[in-house]
Amino acid sequence: MKVSCIAFSFFYIILFSVQTQAQECYKFITKDFVLGKFDFETDSCFIKVAPELSNKTIYLQKEVYDAFVKMNTAAKKDGVQFKVISGTRNFFYQKSIWDRKWKTNSNLSPIENAKKILLYSSMPSTSRHHWGTDLDINNLSNSYFESGQGLKEYNWLIAHAHDYGFYQVYTSKNNGRTGYNEEKWHWSYMPLSCQYLEFYNTNITDADISGFEGSELASELHMVSNYVNGISKIAKTQ
């Protein structure tokens, strides 16, 4: 049975006893926020990840960071450690990634160029990384998580990450999931991200995706339905 997003979020707020400031931050959801059009470095809801838990300067929402720290502390007891290698990316950050890849693939037709980028990278205004709820962990290669220490880390996440609110949203596409390819490194803090996705689906259309090369293809590619909502079945039930 599907649990409502609000009920799901409330459960984790109680579970982690998050500070009031972090609890209240997610309540004010706007179109600019879900589209990534804000400055996360100056937003009071966001915090810089500690250097020992990241490989560069990375920000996450405070509630998300708190949950990640708790998860990492538990994982250490089992011989597993996690490091955040990518966190919040606003519209302009994502646009820089998109523009670089667009120029690299300039020999392709616009539609084929976009499809190639969309194997693993989002159009600006469509990335879950805009929200400060999604993080990439340890390595950006699926093969890393298929053997050795990487497999141990992935198996731990599969078994325990949901206890801290985190779910792998981009799972195998063998079951008909649309959108991006599988990303074993990408985990989303669902108590907040499910609310942002609900808002996105209610207030955003493909027409809102603009301001970069190739944005005119958003409707043809059905970005909202195929990519923004192209997440795992278990994530959709939260």
Image: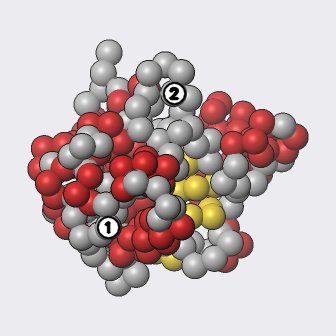
| Quadrant in the picture for residue 178 | top left
In this rendering, position of residue 199 left or right of residue 183:
left
The amino acid type, in three-letter code, at marker 2 is Lys
List x then y, in percent, for residue 29: 19, 59
Ranked by sequence position, the earlier of labels 2 and 1 is 2
Position above or below: 154 against 35:
above
What quarter of the picture does the N terminus occupy? top left
Between 20 and 214, the one nearer to me in the picture:
214
Position above or below: 197 against 176:
below
Q: Which residue is mark 2?
A: 173
Q: Which residue is mark 1?
A: 213
Between 57 and 79, the one nearer to me in the picture:
57
Residue 165, visible in the rendered structure: no
The amino acid type, in three-letter code, at marker 1 is Glu
Q: Which mark is residue 27?
A: none
Residue 102, visible in the rendered structure: yes
In this rendering, position of residue 101 left or right of residue 72:
left
Farthest residue to the top: give it: 1
User: Could you say whether the residue bearing mark 1 is in a helix, strand or loop?
Assistant: loop
